[in-house]
Amino acid sequence: MTQLPLQLEQTDYSGKKSSGFRLQRYEVLNWGTFDRHIWTLDLQGQTALLTGANGSGKSTLVDGLLTLLVPNRSRNYNLASGDTGKRERDEKSYVQGVYDCTSSEESYGSKSKLLRENRTPSILLLYFLDADSQQKVTMAQVLWVQEGKVKKFFVVHKDELSIKTDFDGFNNVAELKKRLRANQAEVFDNFNKYSANFRRLLGLQSDKALDLFNQTVSIKEIKSLNEFVRSHMLEKTDVRAKIQELQKNYEDLTVCHNVIEQARLQLEVLVPLNEEANNYEGLTKEVADLQHNLEIAPAYFASRKLTLLTAEITQIEQQLIQKQQDKDKSDRQLKDLRQQETDLKVAISQ
């Protein structure tokens, strides 16, 4: 690790409990004029003040933070320097390490002096820690120039990473990506997916906080708090457009209200018809039931008659059997009496 040519003044909050994720370490390699070595800001979760002379690299480090946190289309590079006339810095100049320009008599122009050749990778890394939950988040970007354009990929990991340990000694980008994925890191080729991933891990519900950070890096002093809030914390609002939108919404609501009222009146008109329809449906069902009953009535009554006649026949047969038994008994008694008569007649004759 190489010490920065800057002063880093830290405030000790050991007596105070800091909640949420705090930046522990910020590392850069081959970013701007921070060349060849790994340059580190070891913050350890504390609040720090970065100071230094003009040209010492304060804005370069801030722009590195912007590169890690803010999409390219929204970044305001070199605003932190306060030099509103110089906007020549971009990702390509930082990756190549542009540090000066030389005039060229042949082309009647200037040529940039570069610290690094194409394909030399630049690496930016931030490591966060939530002291309460001991959750860790590392985000990093690897950038290089190829065919005149800046190529890059993005890394998010739920553990501590460092440039020296996890990004050093690779032969090509594919090998580095494979090594990082093997270490359970998430590798992205798209900033939106990378941003959504680290914002979810850090608990940022939207990118508004990052937009505010991007806007406030250029602030040197606050003359008016109202103007600061209006310019940097509130979204710009077109009052005329808002009024037109409100008018349109009011007209839409009025149309919806009229349609609802018309539908309500139509429903009120249809209520008697609906009642008559329900009544007609009930009567139709009742007529159908009666017609069905009329159709099955003969069979029903025939069935009932058969049941009654069967029971009557059974009862008569039982009575007949009983009468037959009584007749047989009477016949036996008559036979016995006739035998007694015959016996008496014989006895009398004797």
Image (tube, rainbow, N blue to C red):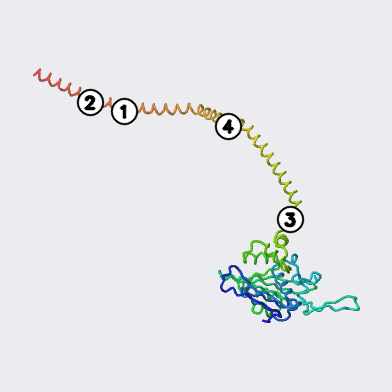
Q: CA distance from mark 1 to mark 4?
A: 57 Å
Figure quadrant of the N terminus: bottom right
**Going from the N terminus, do you reach mark 2 or mark 1 first?**
1
Question: Residue at the left extreme?
Answer: 350
Q: Quadrant of residue 312?
A: top left
Q: Amino acid at mark 4?
A: Asn
**Going from the N terminus, do you reach mark 4 or mark 3 first?**
3
Identify the residue at image location x=62%, y=66%. Answer: 202
Q: Amino acid at mark 2?
A: Lys
Q: Around disc 1, counting alpha carbons within 10 Å, would you say few (fewer than 14), some (14 to 19), or many (20 or more)?
A: few
The residue under label 4 is: 278
State which mark lies toward you, 3 or 2: 3
Q: CA distance from mark 2 to mark 1?
A: 17 Å
Q: Is residue 321 above or below residue 9?
A: above
Q: Position of residue 279 (x, y in %)?
A: 57, 30
The residue under label 3 is: 237
State which mark lies toward you, 1 or 3: 3
The residue under label 1 is: 318
Q: Nearer the viewer, residue 325 or 81?
A: 81
**Going from the N terminus, do you reach mark 1 or mark 3 first?**
3
Q: Is residue 308 above or below residue 114?
A: above
Question: Residue at the top extreme?
Answer: 349
Q: CA distance from mark 4 to mark 3?
A: 57 Å
Q: Quadrant of residue 55?
A: bottom right
Q: Are marks 4 and 3 in contact (CB under 8 Å)?
A: no
Q: Around disc 4, counting alpha carbons within 10 Å, would you say few (fewer than 14), some (14 to 19), or many (20 or more)?
A: few
Q: Amino acid at mark 1?
A: Gln
